[in-house]
Image (cartoon, grey):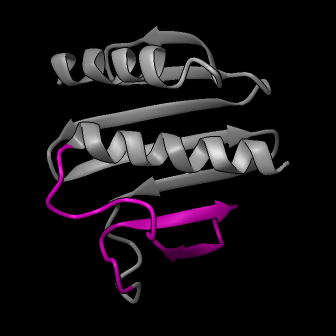
């Protein structure tokens, strides 16, 4: 897990330095501080369980694998889009790719959303 978190930090610093202004490594997560003051917590304790949580003011954007939304086509992956209650299919990440590749996809998605607003 720790090695994976270091890889996420390296990706954030090297490939997303245009939106990431600070990084923090914690025992259970990586925190990224973004240019607009928002922050991302990445938790990836095991291969099939993860959470990419972006807190932007009072809005949340989180892709996770918590098994709560069985009706979603991409179950267990789903997106909380803007709030806990607004749950949609995960159209950002892919199955059968590395955690690092999905982290990059998540960060690309965040980057696009930041630039839109």
Residue furthest toward the right?
117
Residue 46: percent from left, percent from top: 16, 41
Q: Does residue 115 show up magenta in the picture?
A: no
Q: If the image is split into quadrants, where does the N terminus sit?
A: top left
Quarter of the image holding residue 19? top right
Quarter of the image holding residue 8? top left
Q: In the displayed structure, does residue 1 sit left or right of residue 10?
A: left
Image point (34%, 78%), residue name: 74
Residue 79: percent from left, percent from top: 51, 64
Image point (17%, 45%), residue name: 98
Q: Main secondary structure of the magenta part?
A: loop
Residue 24: percent from left, percent from top: 48, 10
Quarter of the image holding residue 22? top right
What is the total number of numbered labels drawn onto the structure image?
A: 0
Q: Which residues are magenta?
A: 73-98
Q: In the displayed structure, does residue 104 sit left or right of residue 55?
A: left
Residue 55: percent from left, percent from top: 67, 39
Up-down relation of residue 31 to residue 24 (above or below): below
Image point (35%, 15%), residue name: 10
Q: Does residue 78 show up magenta in the picture?
A: yes
Image point (50%, 40%), residue name: 107
Which residue occupies the foreground of this view, 108 or 74?
A: 108
């Amino acid at each position: 897990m720790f090695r994976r978190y270091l890889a996420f930090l390296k990706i954030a610093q090297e490939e997303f330095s245009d939106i990431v202004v600070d990084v923090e490594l914690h025992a259970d997560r990586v925190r990224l501080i973004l240019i607009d003051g928002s922050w991302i917590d990445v938790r990836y304790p095991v291969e099939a369980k993860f959470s990419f949580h972006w807190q932007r003011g009072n809005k949340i954007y989180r892709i996770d694998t918590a098994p709560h939304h069985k009706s979603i086509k991409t179950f267990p992956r789903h997106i909380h889009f803007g709030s806990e209650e607004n749950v949609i299919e995960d159209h950002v990440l892919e199955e059968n790719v590395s955690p690092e590749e999905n982290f990059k996809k998540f960060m690309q998605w965040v980057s696009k959303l930041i630039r839109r607003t």
